[in-house]
Amino acid sequence: APGATLVFGNDSVALGQGTNYFWLTYDIDSAAVINNYVDAKCNSVTVDDTARTLTVSSPVGNKQIRNYVNVGTGTLTTTATADGSPYANYYDGSKNQFLILASDLIASGVGTGPLNSLAFDVSNVNGCQALVNFSVSLKNTNSTTLSTTWETGLTNVYTAASYQPVLGWNTHQFTTPFVWDGVSNILVETCFNNTTYTNNASVYRTNTSTISSHYFRQDNNNNLCASTANT
């Protein structure tokens, strides 16, 4: 609870010769209020029945309680006509694969276990129309870069008969959680297939050191999402 004081007594640990370090850790209750902050400090440590003065008792910083993480910096944007957006309706249909490295997931605070949704941050809708049969599929992969060959063996986690991109975060709630193994990179595939075109909804993006996106877009292709054609 906010402002609560916890006292731990009758606990002991053997100290080693030299400098000994202690970490303040805490578990977040499943009923905790999202976007609140947690912080902690250690008031005293008793060694050999004597209270000791701590060099640092209240470490700088706190943690926000979140049920999401942001991967990447998102300081750049895609355009209304170029590739790179999952909502790319400059052509009738568009199929995309995006590679997210495990190192980036870990750096963002993602842990091993189930993922329940994926979101893209739209900077400008650009008049993009509703996307027909918009789908999201995922896969744990050992690939560290993408090529002109489409990865296969993905699991569909989201499908909408019609999805209208909106300004800001567009969250796609999975029908079944996707389990990340904590080691592999994650491959994301999006696809839709309209019969007319408008513009791409621009999304925020991040430059990467490897080839992390692969796309195919085309007009008048009823089987675009099953296509293995290369861009």
Image (cartoon, rainbow, N blue to C red):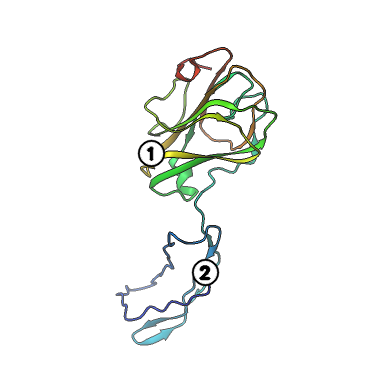
Q: Quadrant of residue 197?
A: top right
Q: Is residue 211 visible?
A: no
Kind of residue sitting beneath label 2: Pro
Q: Quadrant of residue 116?
A: top left
* Residue 213, image x, y percentages: 52, 28
Query: Which is more toward the observer, 148 or 138?
Result: 138
Image quadrant containing the C terminus: top right
Q: Which mark is residue 40?
A: none
Toward the front, the furthest residue is: 161
Side of 15 relative to 211 (left or right)? left
Up the image or down, 22 lies above or below 195; here it is below
* Residue 170, image x, y percentages: 58, 39
Up the image or down, 184 lies above or below 5; here it is above
Q: Residue at x 65, y 35 (%)?
A: 77
The numbered mark, 2 or 1, whose residue comes first in the sequence reads 2
Q: Which residue is mark 2?
A: 59
Side of 71 relative to 151 (left or right)? right
Q: Which residue is mark 1?
A: 184
* Residue 192, image x, y percentages: 53, 24
Kind of residue sitting beneath label 1: Ser
Side of 102 relative to 70 (left or right)? left
Q: Residue at x 59, y 44 (%)?
A: 73
